[in-house]
Every structure is written in C-alpha cells, then in structure tokens.
Amino acid sequence: MRVKSSKANKINVVTLGCSKNVYDSEVLMGQLKANDMEVSTDDEDANIVVINTCGFIGDAKEESINTIIDFVQLKEAGEIDKVFVTGCLSERYKTDLEKEITDVDQYFGTHDLPNLLQALGADYKKELVGERLTTTPKHYAYLKISEGCDRSCSFCAIPSIRGKHVSISIEDLVTEAQKLASNGVKELIMIAQDLTYYGLDLYGKRRLADLLKELVKIEGIEWLRLHYAYPTSFPMDALEVMRDEPKVCNYLDIPLQHTSTRLLESMRRGTTQEKTNALISKFRDMVPDIAIRTTLIVGYPGETQADFEEMKDWVADMKFDRLGVFAYSHEEDTPAYDLEDDVDEETKQLRVNDIMEIQASVSFELNSNKIGKVYKCIFDRVEDDYFVGRTEYDSPDVDNEVRVAVDDYYISLGDFIDIEITDATEYDLYGKPLGKSKNR
C-alpha cells in the first residue's frame, strides 16, 4: 500500500528537451508563484512533480519516458505524492501514455497550461502573460517570440505537436524584455520554432528586423542572440540590423540539415545545395564577422555513402563556426515515416562521429586563430577551477566556452570582461582578463 509523503506541499518542475521547454516551464513556475505556491527545481524538496517532456526524436522520447518512470517509482515508494506530465511527449502520445504508465496523476499537452494549473490547485492569471520565474543564470534569459511552425519538413513532428505558427506582438515582447532587464538580464536569447517567419501572421510581413530594432532600445540589454532560423525566404533586413547594431550578436543558429539537393527535396526544405551555399556566402558578405551555427541530419532515408561523402567534403569546406549532428530518427506522423528507414543505426552513428571529427578539426583551426586576440566575454559560472564564460559568438550550453583560471584571477559572474585569448582547444578558449592583476 502506497503511503503519503511527509513533505509539505512543494512543486518541482522537471524540464527536459530544448530551450523552448525551459521557457514554458518558467511560465508555469511564474504562474504558480503568483498563486503563492512554493516551487522548486530540486526533486528532493518537493512532494508534487511536474515533468515537462520532450517528444522530438527517439533519444529524447526515451529520456522522457525513463524520467516519468523514475518519478512514478518514487510516488509508489511514498517519497512523493503526485506526478503530472506535460509537454511535447504528452501532447504527442497522451493516449498511449495513459494506458502504459497509469500511476501518473494526469497528462497534459503543450497548450494545456490553464488545465494543468487547475490540477495543481492554482488559477491561470491572464494578467501575467509575459512574466515568468527564470531558471537560467540571472544575466541571461530566453525570449520566445512565437509558438508553433508552418513548415512541412518531412522528418519533423513539431507542427503536429506545437501547432501553427503564432507570433507574439512586438509590444508584448518589448514589455517582457523590459521586465527581464529590470531584473538584471543583460543577454536575451531569442527563440522560436522558426524566427524567420516572425510577424507574418500578425502583420502580413516578416518583422524580425523591426522587433530587433525595438529590443536594442531597452536599457540594460547588451546582447541579443538569434536562435533557430530557417534558410528559405530568410529576411535579410534582420542581417542588416545585426551588422549595424552592436547589441545584436554576430551569431546565427540556422539548421541546414543536409547538403544533398536530392535529399533536401525529400526533406521538403525548399532549397538546394547551390541556394544554401549562396545564402551562407551572402551572410558572410553582409556580416563578415558572423558566427554561424548549424545542425545536420545523417542517415536520412535514401542517404547513400556518396551523399555522405559529399556532406563530409562540404562540412570541411564551409568551416561553420559551430555544428551539431543528429542521427535520423524515424518518427510517426511525419511524411518521412512512409519512407524506408534504410540506413542502419550503427552506420548512422559512425556518420555522426565522422562529421564531428571533421568539425573538431575545423573548430580547432578557428579557435587557434583567436590566440592573441581580445574578446568581450560574459561569465556564467565556476567549474573545475575555472571561471567559464562566452564570447558574443557562443550561446550557453551548446557552443565554445572561455575559461579563466580561478587561482589566477577573480571575475564576477554576469559581468562583461575583455579577455585576451592565450590558448585554445577544439571547443574551449583559455585567456586572461585585460586590466586585472593576478591574484596574490
């Protein structure tokens, strides 16, 4: 017989997946806090758990399911009282989950925030739109500018999970950004399923550039960073703002997915290798100092060894500043699911490793060229005897880091410091702050 825990009511929100889930969890916690409910991010302190799941690809789904099972077992042992599940996995597989993992108290989808709050004993407060309880370090925060996606990429289930593209108004985003700045946020990381589509639904045209022009006016915000752009019909006026406005980081995250024109067509990406190459060249012409981050998929149905060799050569030639690779995941309810998943898992992983080995070499070359140069950096944390920071060309958690020895110098977290780079590895830079004496 399961017993009730002896803990006072406290809600732990466990977040899995991408930065958009982080944002959603922060909105949930802000609502709970406004209802005078105690919220924790430490599972040992809470008796009620909300798991915000990811359902994008196989590995993420497995992590989400394992996390649900772990907390259900804690509930059965009497260590916690209730388990609620929300997010992408729950949106996508709610019926199956209700049948398979029955001891979860309730499942909610990605658009069920008011119902989830009601189940937790809280009221949804419409006047709090744009407010949240941030979980990132105090000096940076995510700013979600739209929800959903109107693209039809063959491998992606996000439109069926998140729905159609819906932009948030410029006025509401400015208000939200002002509140974040008043709380000490210096860097805004702008996220969406597709930044480049911003404004079409509200204003009848793409208005990412106009949004940037308003956000740079906010006192206290020093960096604006663009994540998750789409290569087709890219709004080049946004690049003009990046070029002309010091507050907009010379950084763009633009998943390109593949280089084979044949596979890009099957992926429904609306572009070709030639158009992709021309777009990247245009980016680099307009903003010569731009750092481009991209992601690729290997093992997509029909990818031959020749296709993969072409991709390897392309990665070596393009010299992307940052690059990640996913092994193709055969996902239900996507157009590609009708294709034969004909590249075996071992081959997919070998291809991932091969691409990342090439990128490691590219990254080492680019990083080595930074030795002796000075970069404005912001510092996020202390780790392994180093203050760990980033240049404007690096986003948290996914990109290169700048390390300064704790034993040699003192740096206040959240501060911008000019750092001279003294050494480099594939994914780390080492340096010393200008104008600071060594610790005695």
Image (cartoon, rainbow, N blue to C red):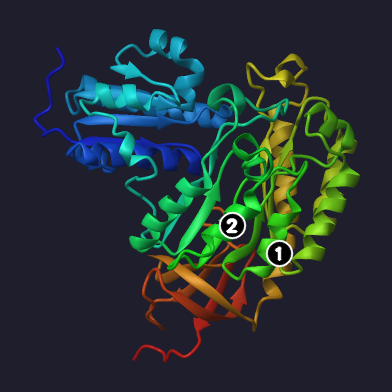
- Please say whether residue 107 is visible from this viewpoint: yes
Label number found at residue 212: 2
Q: On the picture, is 32 further left or further right than 280?
A: left
Q: Nearer the viewer, residue 366 or 414?
A: 414
Q: Quadrant of the C terminus?
A: bottom left
Label number found at residue 158: none
Q: On the picture, is 300 further left or further right than 92?
A: right
**Amino acid marked by disc 2:** Leu
Expressed as whole percent of the image width and height from the top left, the position of residue 430 reads 55, 75
Q: Residue drawn at (78%, 64%), measured in percent from left and top? A: 286
Quarter location, residue 307: top right
Which is closer to the viewer, label 1 or label 2?
2
Give neighbour class at mark 1: few <14, some 14-19, many 20+ (Cα, 10 Å).
many
Q: Residue drawn at (43%, 22%), measured in percent from left and top? A: 109
As drawn, 276 above or below 46: below
Q: Which residue is mark 1?
A: 290
Tag 1 and tag 2, C-beta contact below 8 Å: no
Quarter location, residue 160: top right
- In the displayed image of the protein, which residue is found farthest to the top? 99
Q: CA distance from mark 1 to mark 2?
A: 17 Å
- Count of numbered marks: 2
**Amino acid marked by disc 1:** Ile
Dot 1: element: loop
Q: On the picture, is 172 further left or further right than 11?
A: right
Quarter location, residue 319: bottom right
As drawn, 373 above or below 98: below
Give neighbour class at mark 2: few <14, some 14-19, many 20+ (Cα, 10 Å).
many
As drawn, 440 above or below 207: below
Q: Of marks 1 and 2, which one's residue comes earlier in the chain?
A: 2
- Please say whether residue 399 is visible from this viewpoint: no
Expressed as whole percent of the image width and height from the top left, the position of residue 1 reads 14, 12
Q: Nearer the viewer, residue 70 or 115?
A: 115
